[in-house]
Structures are given as C-alpha cells and as structure tokens.
Image: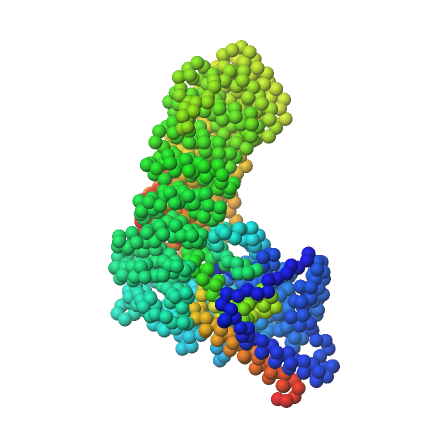
Amino acid sequence: MAYPMYEVDWSVLPPEQNRRFNPAFNIATIKQVVNEAIERVAPVSVRMQTPTRLRDLIRQIRAARTAAEERSVVNKECAYIRSTFREEDSVWRCRNIAKLLYIHMLGYPAHFGQLECLKLIASPRFTDKRVGYLGAMLLLDERQDVHLLITNCLKNDLNSNTQFVVGLALCTLGAIASPEMARDLASEVERLIKSPNAYIKKKAALCAFRIIRRVPDLMEMFLPATRSLLTEKNHGVLITGVTLITEMCENSPDTLNHFKKESGQREIVPNLVRILKNLILAGYSPEHDVSGVSDPFLQVKILRLLRILGKNDAEASEAMNDILAQVATNTETSKNVGNTILYETVLSIMDIKSESSLRVLAINILGRFLLNNDKNIRYVALNTLLRTVHVDTSAVQRHRTTILECLKDPDVSIRRRAMELSFALINSQNIRAMMKELLLFLERSDPEFKAHCSSAMVLAAERYAPSSKWHLDTLFQVLLKAGNYLRDDTVSSTLQIVSAAPGERQAYAAMRLWSSLERSAVCADATEKQPLVQVAAWTIGEYGDMLVSEASNAISMVDDDGVDDFTRPSEEYVIDIYQKLLWSTQLSITTKEYLLLSLAKLSTRLTTKPSQDKIRVIIDTFGSHIHIELQQRGVELSQLYKQYAHLRPALLERMPPMEAGAPEHDAEPEHDKPPPEQDALLDLIIGSEPLSNGDMEHAPAPPTNNNSTTNDILDLLSGLDLSTPSVPTPTTAVSVTNNNMATPSLLLDGLFAPAQPPVQPQETVVRALERNGVLVELVAQRGGDTAALTMRARSSASTTITDFLFQAAVPRTFRLDMMSPSGTVLTPQGEITQLLKITNPSKTPLRLRIRVSYNIDGNPILEQAEVNNFPPDLFN
Amino acid sequence: MMQFMLLFSRQGKLRLQKWYVAHPDKLKKKITRELITTVLARKPKMCSFLEWKDVKVVYKRYASLYFCCAMEQEDNELLTLELIHRYVELLDKYFGSVCELDIIFNFEKAYFILDELVLGGELQETSKKNVLKAIAAQDLLQEDEAVDGALREVGLL
C-alpha cells in the first residue's frame, strides 16, 4: 500500500495572521542542541544505545511502502521498547512511551506499556508526568487492575503545589474515572473546587461532573461547593459550573428544587438571567467573541440549564421569558454561531411554560431554519420540530409541504428526520395527501427505512382511514412497495381487515390482489414481495369464487388515476399462476404454505371439473415434497379427496370474520390448544384473533418463526409507538428476562434492587388487571428519568396457579429493564413480584402494555391490558 | 457530553483518538473502523450530522482531515461544530497554519491542546487565549527541565 501525498497547507486563519509562530519550535531546538551536546560529551559506557527518536520512528513508519513493511518496522521497535521496559531504563522511558502511543494509534497492541505509564506518572519530572498521564488516558480503560495504582498516583498529584500537575491529574481522572476511583478521589476533587485558582477550579468542577455521572450517590457532597461557582467572573469556571449544576438537576428532582429554593442574591434563575444578559449586552470582548457573538458556548449551556429549571415551573418560566425573547430577537443569524444559540433558545421556549407569543416566535424561527440553505440548519429544524410537534401541532402543520419536500433530500440524516416528522403530522384531514407522499417515499427509500416506515403507515392508515376502500387500497400499496421488508404483523393485520370487511369489499380486495399477484408472477418478482403473495393467496383462497364469477363485473375497479385495467381471469389462468408460484424455487416455505392452502380452498370455489382436477393433481404432487411441512400439508389435503371427501366442502368453508380486539379466552370453544407463542404476541399487536385459531385446516399453517420472545416483544411495541411523536432512539433496548433464563446475578439484582431506597420514595399503586382471582398491581416509585415499577401479582383463587409469566412493553421513547420474577407459581393467597425499571428521557406520560399468562387448573389463560393511569409526574 | 473524538485523514488513517467513555480496546477499534467508513462514504454536500447507534456523530472536514465527535442525544449539534472549529483554531495558532503533518509528528501536542479545551467530554475553557497560555506555560516547564537535566548531565549544575 503506497502512502498518498498529503496536503501540506491548510489554515482557518486569514493569510496575514498566518505566521508560523511556534513556541514548541524553540523548545525543540534547544532540547535537540542540548541532547546532542550530551551525546557528544557523555561517556559511551553510561548510555549503551540511544533509542530512535519519536520523529525518526514516525518517518520510518511513514516511509514503509507496504503494510508488511510497516508491520516489520513496528514489530522491531516494539521488541526494542519491551526490552528497555524489562531493563527498567528510566532515562528513555518517556521517549519510548511516546513512540508506543504512536504505534498504538496505528492499531497495534500496546497494553504492555500500561505499567510504564504509571512509572512515568510517579516520576517527579513534569515532562514524564505529562506523557505518562497521556499514556494512561490512552492505554488504560476502566477494566484495568492497575487502577488501584493510578488512584494513588492521582491522589498524590491532586495535592501537588504545581497547578499544571494538579491539572494533569484532574484531566486524567475526568477521562478514565471508574466508579471506584470516583469514590476514592471525590473528596480531593471537592476540595479543589473550592481552590482560589480558576485553572484548577474549572477542571475540578468538570471532574465532579464526571464523578456524579459515574456515581450519582456522591452528588450530595459537591452541593455546597457548587453553589459559589456561579458567582465567579471567569468564563471557564462559569461554564463548568453550569455544566455541573445541569448534571445535578437532571439527575435528581430534589437537587433541582434545592437549587431553585435558594433565595435572595443567590437565587439561581435570576442569577443565570443576569449572566446571560451581561453576555448579550457586554459588547465586543475579543477573548470570548465568536463571529460577533459573545461566548456562544456559555450562552448555550445557560439556556439549557434554564430549560431544565423552567420546566413545569410557572414562576421560573416567568422569570426567564424576557431574556429568552431578547435572545431570540437579537441574535445575529448570518452565521452558524447565531443559529446555534437560536436553536437552543427555541428548545428552551418550547420546553418551559412560556408565553404564547414567545412560542409563535420560536416556531417561526424553526420555519426560517427549514428554508435555510445550510443543510445542518435544516436538519436541526426538523429535529426540533419533531420534539415540539406534540406541543403545538397546528403550528408545525404549516410547514408540512417543506417537510414533505425533505423526504426527497439526498441526505439520509435529513430523510430520516423528515420521515419521523411526517408521521407525527398525519391526521384525519391530511391523511390522503400525506400517504401519497409517503408511499412514494417508501418505494424509493433505503431498506433500513422500509420496515419502520411501512409499519408506521399501516398504523396511520388504521387510525385515520377516511373509508374502508381507501384503507384496503393503501394497505395493498404498502404491501406492494415495502416488499419483503414488511414486518410479519402487517400481513396478519391486513388479513384481519379483509376478513372483517363487507362482502363486496372482499371481492374488491380479491380482485385488486389478484392483479398484483398476477403481475408479480408474470414479472417473476414475487420473491421480493412475499408478504404481498401471502395476503393475496389468503384472500383469493377465501373469496376466489367472487373473483372468477360474473358478479365481479359490478364492482368498480377504477383506481385513483381513473383507469380500470382489471380483466376477469379464467379459472384455468388462476390455477396456472398458482402453479407457477408453487413451482418457483425461491418462495419461502411459509409463502408456499399460504399458496397451497389457498389452492385447496379454491378447489371448492372453482366450479368446473377440469380446474378441480388440475388442483387435485397439484396438491397430490406435494405429497412427496422435499420439505416436511409442505409434504404433510400435501398428504393431508389429498386425503380430503379420498376417504374424507364428504368433509371437504365443510372444512374448506370461508373463515368467519376475524374480529379485532377479541380477548383470547372468549375465543371459539373449538380451539383445544393454546395458540403458539408468536401468534399470541402478534395478537397483542394487531388486537385480532390469530390466524391459527379455529380449525387448523382452515387457515394457513402458522409461519415457522424462529424469533425469540424478545423480538416479538419488540414487535409488540409498534402498536404504541406512533401515537405520540417523539425523538426516536435508534435502538430500543428491551430486555426481558424470564425465569428460565435467569442467571444467579440477575436473581440477585431482582432481590436487592428493591432494597435500595430512592431519595424520598413516593409510591403509587396502579391496579393493572384483575381476573380469575388474580390481581396484578403495579407499584410505581418516581425518581428522575428512571421510575421503578414493582409488579405484584396476588392470587385469591382456591387452587394453585402455575407457569405465571408477566410481560410488558413500552413505547420506543422509553427503555424498559425487567428483573427476574420472584417465582412462577402462585399459591392461593400467594404473591409474585417482579421489578421493572423504566427510563424515560423525554418525560412523556408512561403507557404500558402488559400481558399475563398462567395455568389455572390445567387451563392456560392469557390476559392483556393497557395501563395508562400512572401519575403524570412519574418522571420528574 | 462528548463520548469520543476522532481525527482521521481522507484515506481513513486515524490521526487522533480521544475517548471519554470506557470501552474495551476491541470495541474502540470496531467503532473507529465503522465510523470512519460511514463518514468517508458521505458526500460533501450532506449535513454534518449522523445518527449512528445511540450517539449523534458531528463531523467536519478541514482540508485532508476529518474531525469527528460523538455526542449524546441532548447535546447541541451546531455547538459541537463550533467546538470542532475552536479546536482547529487552537491547533492553527499553536502550530502556525497547521497541516496534517504537524498533527502526525506532534500528536502528543495535539492531545495536550485538546485536554486544555475539553475535560471529561465537556468544554472547560471558552477563551482561546487561556488555553494557549496554559499550553505555553507547560511547554516552558518541560523546556526548563530539559535544560536543567542537560546541564546536570554535563556536570555544570
């Protein structure tokens, strides 16, 4: 691999300021001269071999023309460095570590330098310490055993008389503090916050910030020292102080109140307002100026803290209204800096209880952002609109066209935001227009978007469909355009909707789907659209008689463009298409199962003798299919032509309409075994009966699904997701631990976690479910971003309940962690508890879907419920 | 809070890495590799933000070098761009019209400057002057030691 040429010159400064002023240069020269002098004068015996200089090593490595050559240079040097470490050569240790750090950056292992770094740190020389600490930050991470050693070194240096030595120690602590280190050194840091030296003070404040991040319990001890930070003049101290207070306030509502309550001169909100005002009015100060704005870094931090202080607090909000208006109107917007501040201001205005005129101002700023030429500003605008859409939907609606335009942006970051925002803006008035745009988007979008986008579209269509015909058309379009990226649940929910529709609509569905099926069979792209094939097969199987009969002529197939391109197929043609698809090697087994059962059903729908014979031949061939499942189907269905022929018409009857939302235990008595796990979970999503209910012969076999429960639970979330617009987290972490997976440590977690009392726990008991003598309650304990819910199941039944399993799902903005349950067997009057931890950064009201399954007297029971009546201030 | 900062060249060579969260070495390498590929694949006209795993990546290219910061969800993306720019200005002031080679050959200096600007993932100093002053003073300390050491070696002290 050859090294390319490097651009030698780049500068952000205008040429006139571009002199090569270099303090390092002088030092380097002096050092070099001195070193060379030493090497000349010193007797050879003292220094056996002078190691390569860092600069020369870098040159050598860069001169390597191939990767192998580079490796050999590095290996040789590493071997040499190791040998000097073994010989305890302290003279060149610093240089050797520096070289090792360069080698480390290239990706080679360098862990053997860890201890040497500690030796450097312990050296009295500043040069050694500086490189030693740099090495420690790069080579150590929290898992290292050497941490105990470094904690001692840090403790020493935190007490040093040289401010820069203290600075190095604080910097290192801030970068690599583990919880143990944080605990051991917290008191030193607290002492240093009170130092009169601003250089040390600011670093100590940020160290405290990191310590609290790692160990929130330690917050209390920093409170008194933190108070005075805001009275300082130095901007470094101010900004670090604001950062520290922000972290504390976000961490604990008690601390938030603590800061708010301080009265008089030191009241926090007026104090911050004063600092901000001074910044705006102070005029030009060269030290902190960034393109005409005075210290934007500090301004943004203060605005963010004001937002936290003003949230749900009318009085505090009132006190900051004026300054927010002032910032929003006076900030220069021609540069990125100005927009940075405006962006933060808008967020604050929307989050606090601000005046309505101020909100209008904020939304207008976002409107301007949306039209900005700078992509970054547009991205930020979309992001913020998404966060504020729940506060003022109508104001955001005004920018709808611009937002839809952003769906076509070439930049994936912008497209993603625009998509989320579009879904948040859909309502019953604009659904037709929005869906049209979103369908176009779905067709062209990247695969990573398709699953999410299609599910969201299905939900929106379900919620706002203006007519059932439109609803069906939209679903079919989604099926067509999302292809295989469609999630499984969409197939079953579509089937449920078709099944529940009136007769004429079912015929319409069969005809529409026939067109799509035929087209994909002819174009041979059915493998890319398997969910569509499944839905089409099921529908045609059920309502095939209407498809081929004269009656279909009465149904209008005119589409949106006013074209009716439907031709009624002949029976043979239908069977030909089926045969073609069934013979295809690329369709999945599940899809083929749908097709095969559909074909069997068609045998009673199609009336002519030749078509019936043809169907029978096809089915018989499956009796020897290589795949066991299909073979079994083939054999079973063939039997229906032989000794059970009299049962065939009745067995292949149309399915009764599937009802949405029917509870599981009320289902038809004929189903004798509990539905398989995945269907039950699907059920929870679509709120309809699973396909496999009733006679197994009637419906396509349940898809062979290897998904774990966790995945299904994830799916289950989709039902809750889109009704509240919110900033989506890219990954929803849901961990479900049921007792058979429980490891000993998880069990311990479950036992010990409730024992840690949160600060002033306030408990609320929410009754979630009560049936069959089983009462499920949720005990909610509020606290910051994370609430702890304890599930408590009590039985008043006379018999023992076994296999008790509690599952829960939350919308995507939440994070749910479930601990192991205390058991699975519920004796009469017994109790099972399970701890749930719910993290909610967006602080929206909690909605929870729960499912409880158990065996009572050998009968499996499945219950589900949605719990919405949590106290609104659960997260504060 | 900044989770990490990476500097890499247009050819994908890592020039600087600063981690404020604890990850095992292996994971760091994986993240670095994936992120460099993702960022380099983006077109110049695209926005500077990237939602990547659970972080917001803010990056900007200065000549042949990409400056890339991973921020948390609550952080102001635009301000991160200002922070990157501030770092570049500081490098420029220190090295005098800095270029990639300066950072390669003096990577430790680039780290030292970053450590005076950012601590534990948060900005610690908003004055350029103060940062440069602190660096100069520490360089001077090193220089004194070097001279002192040299004189001691040759027996003049």
Compared across the picture, whether A470 is left or right of A323 comes to right
Q: Position of residue A801 (x, y in %)?
A: 42, 37
What colour scheme does the image use? rainbow
Q: Position of residue B134 (x, y in %)?
A: 49, 75
Q: Position of residue A417 (x, y in %)?
A: 43, 47
Quadrant of the rendered structure where residue A37 is? bottom right
Which image quarter is the N terminus of chain B in? bottom left
Q: Nearer the viewer, residue A624 or A381?
A: A381
Compared across the picture, whether A477 is left or right of B149 comes to left
Q: A187 above or below A708?
A: below
Q: Residue at x 34, y 55 (%)?
A: A346
Q: Nearer the viewer, residue A793 or A313?
A: A313
Q: Residue at x 41, y 56 (%)?
A: B74
Q: Residue at x 47, y 52 (%)?
A: B47
Q: A801 above or below A821?
A: above
Q: Residue at x 34, y 61 (%)?
A: A331
Compared across the picture, whether A190 is left or right of A326 comes to right
Q: A587 above or below A259?
A: above
Q: Nearer the viewer, residue A644 or B79?
A: B79
